């Protein structure tokens, strides 16, 4: 953790691979040491990969191979960059390059002068000497809070807490002129490790090199001059030694599955990893907590379906064999007529998810999503106050290396044009015309990817149709009777595999598309990447579910006039109990499969494989040479280099946002979705924690006051869920047809006769030739078969046209969608209005902090003024007493501190000296 002197702390590490060129001087020039070029000489390349060293007398040039020339160029860039870092005030320490090739590290330390200068430039808020009391809410809320704290005490992580939680340090942006305001007990520990590494990272990002006009460490890493740049972890997370560091504390109290029941130490996470990662885990923790009440209500709704299944009249009528509803064949020629009672199991299972309680649960989940977002805004504001993020300004971001490269190419091109045409001005930024090829490629490729997703869904539909037809030809009775179950289960598994494969492809494609757009800053790059990846993954994950919910069984036609695909294959129909049960199966398998395979197995397995691959690659590239200076134990920078680099929070947020969609969008069809999400998230929190603490290099701390664009996506999903659930209840379930029958057509106000009401008659003599069942086991006197639809009977003048009941049910469905959507939206707006975004106590504390800050500064200025006056009075006394030398010193002091009009100038710059 320190330099070789064991005093200066390692704040940052640069790693690079080097390869020494064997020195072979021309004949007669002496030893290799004499002819090795100095660092002051430049490498001359003729564009063919060959280089030579100018300035050596009597030597035309030392020809270098392309690999040696590139390595020499990189070495010169490293030396220049490190010289510039030293000029910026940083202190560096390098490993000796005692092998022909290998890995080397540059360790960087920032002294106090650099830290204080950069902290002032970055306006980092630091604690002052002033502390003030945090006023707590009184009354019943305080009592309930105390009871809650006592009850949850066993669940609290055992991490160091502030001695007095009712007091808070007043924070103020660091200023060297006002250094006396800050609570500086020890200069080495005043800035914590995360702040020190952040300061060094800012210097690394803006320090330039002349070669290729590169700006900062990101460009150098992109050009393979350095392999990596990272801050160090605070030591090992395991081990028997007694020294406890923050990393070990996080591992013990947070990053283990054994502590899944404990709350997260959010403040310690923020201190160690920075505000951006701290906000992610705070959001994930709140989301997981909010899943608890929704899981309980979902279980109650499911149990209600289980309890009322015996009293459900429509499923009883379907299971009653005395009704003997003879249904029309499910396929042409090879399928026979069948009894509706054979679908008894499907009808009873559908009632578990298609009952009046699901309507209540849909409304509840819409309000739940609104309350979750409101509560997150409140928690975010509370964390901003305690983490000193209030009033945080947007920091100026450095351009990305790719943007700089493109801009440099444009400048060179414009410079050539300017020499030919002096009227052409040099443009300093990339315009829309420069990015137009990237935008066109984005539009075309995103459209192609969406069509690819739809093609995959259509391919699975074709598989279902053809497989169902093929299984219907089977001579095995068991195979024929289980056609629907077999086809549904296999098709959903195929859908899951396709989704997982396309997800990985879409992630890579979204990144490539964002890169060819050439965004200027990392923030712009991240936002555009998130939007593209979310769009593609949203369509990929939900397209099969949308098909089952809203399109399957809608374009089947009717007996005698079916809709065919591929010359003879009929479009697939919903099960007799409706498509809601199949939607539930589809949703549950895709959701659970994605969570188990993608979110957990991939997250555990892929980093380990990458680490193994990188280790094997390093062992293969490095020759087995004896190190002349072997160290007994591997140093922290060696251990951290073997870890996986941190690539951002986008994958972590993305999987949770997609899960949030599963929980809210189709919750009417699967009330147990929140429960499975809760079980997954309990593991997910610890899995992510373990990955950050043990498997990733320490990320650079980034200050952020919110979760950015993710909040807008969450809000959009919440609003979309209201519309989708309204259509699921109205269109996919039988809720509306039952209501219409019960209150408009039932003779006794019950659902008796509902099944018969929903079945239309068809005269079998109207079947097309060649489509009748070939070997029917039913009696030959079947004159009419039934099919599920609202159509006129064959004895009606408008036979097989839509009946009045169809239009009544359709209008009721549309009316329900409008009513449900407006009601839930109104309730959501009401909840949003009733819950303030900023907690009342935090709002008061922010106002109080401003007042305390003004009073503190006035008091300090008053004391400073008194100090000046005392010095002036003592100066006068010394002048009267007499000694010439003293008189001259007092005079000089007066001149420094007296304005021309006799008033005192600001003494802040002289205060430290005094």
Image (spheres, helix red, strand yellow):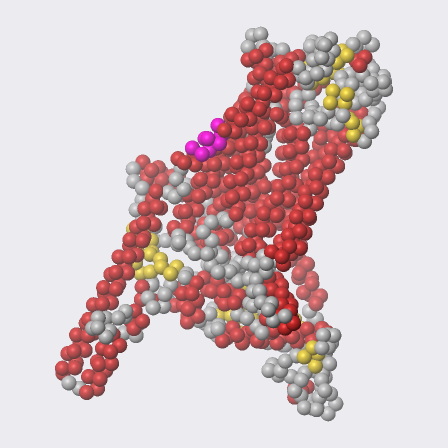
Question: Residue 567 at x, y = what percent?
Answer: 82, 29
Question: Residue 382 at x, y = what percent?
Answer: 40, 47
Quick check: 104 above or below 172? below
Q: Nearer the viewer, residue 91 or 542?
A: 542
Q: Nearer the viewer, residue 658 or 420?
A: 420
Asked if the magenta segment contains residue 828, the reply would be yes
Q: Is residue 27 left or right of residue 5?
A: right
Question: Residue 242 at x, y = what percent?
Answer: 47, 60
- At a point 46% along the width and 56% down the height, the residue shown is 394
* Residue 641 in view here: no
Picture quarter with the C terminus: bottom left
Asked if the magenta segment contains residue 620, the reply would be no
Question: Residue 745 at x, y = what percent?
Answer: 59, 11
Residue 596's image quarter?
top right
- The magenta span reads 823-830
Q: Nearer the viewer, residue 602 or 160?
A: 602
- At a point 23% along the width and 65% down the height, the residue shown is 863
Residue 57's image quarter?
bottom right
- At a point 75% along the width and 31% down the height, the residue shown is 464
């Amino acid at each position: 953790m320190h330099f070789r002197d064991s005093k200066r702390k390692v704040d940052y590490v640069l790693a690079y691979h080097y390869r020494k060129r064997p020195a072979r001087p021309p004949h007669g020039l002496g030893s290799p040491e004499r002819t090795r070029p100095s660092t002051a000489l430049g490498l001359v390349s003729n564009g063919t990969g060959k280089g030579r060293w100018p300035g050596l007398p009597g030597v035309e040039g030392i020809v270098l191979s392309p690999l040696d020339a590139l390595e020499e160029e990189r070495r010169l860039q490293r030396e220049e960059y490190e010289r510039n870092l030293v000029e910026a005030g940083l202190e560096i320490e390098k490993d000796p390059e005692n092998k022909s090739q290998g890995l080397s590290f540059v360790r960087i330390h920032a002294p106090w002068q650099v830290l204080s200068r950069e902290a002032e430039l970055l306006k980092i808020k630091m604690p002052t000497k002033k502390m003030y009391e945090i006023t707590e809410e009184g009354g019943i809320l305080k009592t309930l809070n105390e009871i809650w704290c006592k009850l949850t005490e066993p669940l609290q992580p055992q991490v160091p807490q502030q001695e007095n939680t009712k007091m808070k340090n007043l924070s103020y942006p660091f200023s060297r002129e006002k250094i006396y305001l800050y609570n500086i007990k020890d200069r080495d520990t005043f800035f914590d490790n995360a702040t020190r590494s952040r300061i060094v990272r800012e210097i690394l990002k803006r320090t330039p090199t002349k070669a290729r006009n590169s700006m900062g460490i990101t460009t150098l890493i992109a050009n393979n001059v350095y392999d990596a740049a990272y801050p160090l972890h605070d030591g090992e997370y395991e081990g028997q030694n007694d020294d406890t560091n923050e990393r070990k504390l996080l591992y013990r109290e947070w990053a283990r599955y054994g502590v899944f029941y404990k709350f997260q130490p959010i403040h310690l996470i923020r201190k160690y990893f920075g505000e951006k990662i701290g906000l992610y885990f705070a959001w994930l923790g709140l989301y997981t907590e909010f899943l608890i009440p929704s899981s309980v209500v979902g279980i109650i709704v499911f149990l209600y379906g289980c309890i009322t299944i015996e009293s459900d009249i429509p499923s009883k009528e379907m299971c009653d064999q005395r009704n003997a509803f003879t249904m029309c064949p499910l396929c042409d020629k090879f399928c026979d007529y069948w009894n509706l009672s054979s679908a008894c199991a499907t009808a009873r299972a559908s009632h578990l998810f298609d009952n009046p309680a699901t309507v209540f649960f849909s409304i509840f989940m819409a309000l739940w999503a609104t309350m979750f977002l409101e509560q997150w805004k409140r928690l975010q504001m509370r964390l901003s106050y305690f983490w000193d993020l209030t009033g945080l300004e947007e920091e100026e971001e450095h351009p990305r290396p790719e943007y700089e490269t493109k801009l440099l190419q444009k400048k060179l091109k414009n410079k050539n044009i300017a020499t030919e045409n002096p009227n052409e001005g040099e443009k300093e930024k990339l315009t829309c015309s420069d990015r137009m090829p990237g935008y066109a490629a984005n539009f075309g490729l995103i459209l192609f990817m969406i069509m690819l997703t739809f093609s995959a869904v259509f391919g699975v539909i074709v598989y279902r149709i053809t497989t169902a037809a093929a299984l219907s030809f089977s001579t095995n009775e068991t195979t024929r009777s289980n056609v629907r179950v077999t086809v549904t289960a296999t098709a959903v598994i195929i859908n899951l595999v396709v989704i997982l494969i396309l997800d990985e492809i879409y992630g890579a494609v979204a990144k490539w598309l964002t890169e060819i757009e050439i965004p200027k800053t990392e923030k712009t790059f991240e936002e555009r990447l998130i939007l593209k990846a979310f769009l593609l993954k949203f369509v990929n994950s939900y397209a099969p579910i949308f098909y089952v919910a809203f399109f399957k069984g809608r374009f089947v036609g009717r007996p005698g006039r079916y809709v065919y695909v591929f010359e003879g294959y009929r479009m697939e129909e919903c099960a007799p109990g409706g498509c809601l049960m199949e939607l539930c199966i589809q949703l549950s398998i895709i959701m659970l499969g994605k969570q188990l395979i993608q979110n957990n197995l991939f997250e555990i397995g892929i980093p380990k494989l990458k680490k193994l691959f990188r280790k094997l690659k390093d062992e293969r590239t490095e020759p087995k040479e004896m190190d002349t200076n072997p160290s007994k134990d591997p140093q922290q920078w060696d251990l951290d280099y073997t870890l996986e680099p941190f690539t951002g929070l986008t994958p972590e947020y993305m999987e949770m946002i997609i899960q949030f969609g599963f929980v809210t969008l189709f919750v009417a069809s699967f009330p147990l979705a929140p429960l499975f999400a809760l079980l997954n998230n309990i593991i997910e929190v610890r899995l992510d924690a373990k990955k950050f603490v043990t498997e990733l290099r320490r990320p650079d701390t980034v200050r952020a006051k919110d979760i950015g664009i993710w909040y807008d996506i969450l809000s959009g999903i919440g609003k979309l869920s209201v519309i989708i659930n309204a259509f699921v209840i109205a269109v996919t379930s039988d809720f509306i047809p039952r209501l219409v029958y019960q209150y408009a057509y039932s003779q006794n106000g019950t659902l008796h006769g509902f099944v018969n009401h929903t079945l239309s008659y068809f005269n079998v003599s109207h079947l097309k030739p060649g489509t009748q069942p070939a070997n029917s086991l039913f009696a030959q006197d079947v004159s009419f078969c039934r099919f599920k639809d609202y159509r006129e009977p064959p004895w009606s003048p408008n036979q097989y046209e839509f009946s009045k009941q169809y239009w009544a049910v359709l209008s009721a469905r549309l009316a329900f969608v409008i009513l449900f959507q407006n009601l839930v939206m109104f309730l959501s707006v009401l909840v949003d209005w009733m819950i303030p975004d900023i907690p009342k106590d935090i709002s008061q504390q922010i106002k109080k902090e401003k007042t305390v800050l003004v009073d503190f500064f006035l008091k300090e200025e008053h004391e400073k003024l008194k100090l000046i006056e005392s010095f002036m009075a003592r100066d006068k006394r010394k002048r009267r007493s007499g000694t010439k030398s003293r008189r001259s010193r007092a005079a000089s002091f007066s001149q420094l501190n007296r304005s021309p009009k006799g008033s005192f100038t600001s003494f802040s710059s002289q205060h430290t000296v005094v």
